[in-house]
Image: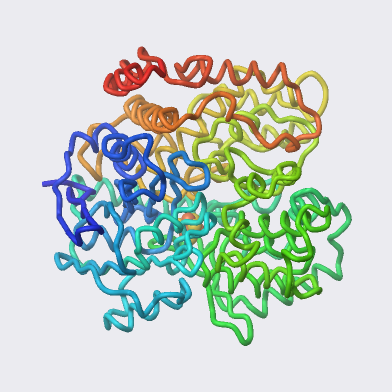
């Protein structure tokens, strides 16, 4: 009997139209836990490193995590993995919602696609019955609309459907995969789905998941629910509103956008509006949000309600969560009403709400600079909002200049030339980042930005405060119930960290402390992504209900795997090194590990090199960021060391 997981994957060969149910190796679960970990193992084993993202040999994997679908609150993530067309490295993106639990209830841990379908199809998984169905009638349909059409066609109102829109069909690099109340948006995974000819995957499952020690597991789940209630009633004091609670930053709940609008960048991630927020704007934005926000919604088995149903008069409804509320608004120098309207169209097209607005703002900046010409914008309206709607249409249809921009700012700038590269200034590893420009270098964030394999800061940062507290009273207040720390030493760093003086950024936290902090943050994210638990309840908030001390008991009682903190740390290290090795095989080197040049005004090249050196050493990597044979041996992954050696990489 397999516990927590089903022990079966679905293997779909799209070129041949073949469907197989394949039993998995439980040993791999012990080593990697599932989710992101076993996705990475499959990619390493089965996809040669020189495979192009749009090759039929590339795999597209939809995975549940080890705890997905169990009663563990927030264990609902679908981990989608492939080679990214945008970065050319391993791309993985997580979506919440309901899809992954439903897949487990149907009897599968993963769906693995290989090959390409000659025609547009959708996959229908209904417990043991799995069919590849024609989707030609869904071509060009919106990602949200498609989900509803498929449910009606199947007469299965409870089917969970992950779908792409026009952007995915047209292999736009910023294409997302949309699913009910969430999306896998980053790194162009929707483009790979479209390239494989998959319009959607619908799933309905009614089977059980078995737990090794159910009574113990339920007790732990109840503790988490109690903690969530406590934290919701007792927000973390002395930090900004969005960091006080749990979940994703509750953008649909909050109205106060002073911090975002005045500190994040407008337009093409360059312009700061220091005194933007005032009573009048606040009142107007509050009214807008209250008008369009029908109700707050949660993902599967979670009380947090991070998302909302948005219903703009005259437009079809859609789901919004998190920062996409402001990305279009600020990229276009517009207001919130515009943001909600264009996000409706963008969600139907299925595009990433972080990258796409930046691509559009980048294009208009190139036009102003005379690098793109009037002829490139023939037919474009002159009003600000009209311009953005027009360009969004061009991008997702790959028409005219939209065809070049559809590859994201990095690749578009390469094609456009004439100095356009300098305008694609907010990228890491070829991928657009949060539009944030700051003053003084923060050593912890430097490392997270530079070395993160997810290439998205919100999937790396988390439990350590972003900046020092103002007074000793505030510091003491923060550390007094900080049970989540893996080691008491982190409390002392918070107590000693100052806004100014010797113990302030960039030299404090010190190099070694910074490495330690980053390792902790990463550890939690890698564990979440293997377990399928939402980072909003674990690695992302300051004081979450899941942490390194209670996770081992969750894993043991759910799966029967003997697990303690040391063992869990080994699993994290294994997964971290495996993903690093996959990317190293695809060319990742130290030179790629840098934040955007203009992310901080004050930079410290010598310190930054020291930080990278220390981080690599801590990880057991060489000076180029490549895991050494010894490190891989310690983790029981000699096969990686041998492969890297054979290729002349180490
Ligand atoms: S915390 Fe928010 S994003 Fe995470 S599972 Fe719960 S509702 Fe979804």
Which part of the image, by quadrant, shows the C terminus? top left
Which of the pair 13/70 is nearer the observer?
13
**Of the pair 34 and 257, the residue shown nearer to us:** 34
Q: Residue at x 25, y 42 (%)?
A: 557
Residue 595 image point, x, y percent: 65, 34
Left or right of 578 in this view: 421: right
Q: Residue furthest right?
A: 275
Q: In the rendered image, is residue 286 in sight?
A: no
In this rendering, is residue 414 above or below 345?
A: above
Tell me which residue sits at (44%, 28%) in the image. 584
How many discs mark residues in the rendered view?
0
Q: Can residue 425 be seen in this view?
A: yes
Residue drawn at x 66%, y 56% is 359
Q: Foreground: 80 or 160?
A: 80
Q: Quadrant of residue 356?
A: bottom right
Residue closest to the far left: 1
What residue is rendered at 39% in x and 54% in y?
A: 77
Q: Position of residue 523 (x, y in %)?
A: 45, 33
Q: Residue furthest top?
A: 630
Q: Where is residue 600 in the image (x, y as percent from the top left)?
A: 76, 35
Coloring scheme used: rainbow
């Amino acid at each position: 009997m397999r516990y927590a997981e089903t022990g079966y994957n679905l293997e779909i060969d799209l070129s041949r139209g073949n469907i197989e149910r394949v039993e998995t190796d439980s040993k791999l679960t012990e080593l990697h836990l599932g989710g992101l970990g076993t996705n990475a193992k499959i990619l390493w084993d089965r996809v040669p490193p020189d495979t192009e993202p749009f090759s039929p040999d590339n795999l597209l994997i939809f995975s549940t995590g080890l705890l997905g679908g169990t009663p563990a609150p927030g264990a609902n993530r679908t981990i989608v993995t492939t080679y990214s067309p945008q970065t050319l490295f391993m791309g993985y993106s997580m979506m919440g919602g309901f899809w992954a639990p439903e897949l487990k209830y149907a009897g599968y841990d993963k769906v693995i696609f290989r090959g390409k379908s000659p025609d547009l199809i959708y996959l229908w998984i209904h417990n043991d019955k799995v069919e590849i169905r024609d989707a030609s009638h869904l071509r060009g349909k919106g990602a949200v609309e498609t989900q509803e059409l498929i449910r009606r066609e199947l007469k299965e109102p409870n089917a969970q459907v992950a779908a792409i829109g026009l952007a995915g069909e047209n292999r736009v690099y910023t294409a997302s995969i949309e699913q009910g109340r969430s999306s896998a948006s980053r790194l162009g995974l929707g483009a790979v789905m479209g390239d494989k000819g998959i319009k959607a995957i619908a799933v309905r499952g009614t089977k059980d998941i078995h737990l090794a020690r159910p009574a113990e597991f339920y007790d732990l789940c109840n503790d988490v629910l109690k903690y969530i209630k406590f934290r919701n009633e007792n927000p973390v004091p002395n930090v900004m509103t969005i960091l006080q609670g749990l979940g994703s930053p509750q953008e649909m709940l909050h109205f106060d956008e002073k911090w975002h609008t005045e500190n994040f960048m407008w337009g093409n991630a360059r312009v700061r509006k220091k005194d933007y927020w005032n009573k009048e704007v606040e009142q107007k934005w509050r009214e807008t949000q209250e008008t369009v926000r029908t109700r707050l919604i949660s993902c599967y088995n979670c009380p947090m309600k991070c998302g909302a149903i948005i219903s703009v008069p005259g437009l079809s409804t859609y789901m919004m969560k998190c920062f996409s509320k402001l990305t279009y608004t600020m990229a276009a120098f517009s207001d919130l009403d515009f943001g909600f309207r264009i996000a409706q169209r963008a969600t139907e097209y299925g595009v990433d709400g972080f990258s796409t607005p930046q691509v559009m703002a980048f294009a208009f900046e190139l036009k102003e600079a005379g690098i793109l010409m009037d002829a490139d914008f023939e037919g474009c309206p002159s009003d600000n909002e009209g311009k953005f709607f027009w360009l969004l249409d061009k991008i997702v249809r790959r028409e005219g200049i939209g065809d070049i921009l559809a590859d994201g700012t990095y690749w578009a700038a390469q094609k456009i030339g004439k100095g356009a590269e300098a305008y694609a200034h907010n990228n890491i590893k070829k991928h657009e980042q949060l539009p944030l420009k700051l003053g003084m270098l923060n050593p912890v964030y430097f490392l997270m930005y530079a070395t993160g394999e997810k290439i998205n800061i919100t999937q790396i940062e988390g439990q350590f405060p972003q900046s020092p507290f103002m007074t000793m009273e505030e510091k003491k207040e923060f550390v007094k119930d900080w049970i989540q720390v893996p080691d008491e030493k982190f409390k002392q760093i918070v107590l000693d960290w100052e806004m100014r003086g010797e113990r302030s950024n960039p030299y404090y936290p010190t190099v070694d402390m910074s490495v330690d902090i980053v390792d902790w943050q990463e550890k939690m994210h890698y564990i979440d992504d293997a377990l399928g638990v939402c980072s909003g309840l674990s690695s992302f908030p300051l004081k979450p209900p899941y942490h390194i001390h209670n996770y081992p008991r969750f894993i043991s009682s759910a799966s029967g795997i003997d697990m303690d903190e040391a063992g869990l740390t080994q699993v994290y290290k294994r997964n971290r090194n495996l993903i690093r090795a996959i990317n190293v095989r695809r060319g990742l080197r130290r030179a790629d590990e840098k934040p955007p040049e203009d992310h901080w005004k004050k930079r410290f090249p010598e310190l930054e090199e020291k930080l990278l050196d220390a981080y690599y050493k801590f990880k057991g990597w060489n000076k180029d960021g490549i895991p050494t044979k010894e490190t891989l041996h310690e983790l029981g992954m000699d096969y990686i060391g041998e492969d890297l050696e054979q290729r002349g990489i180490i």
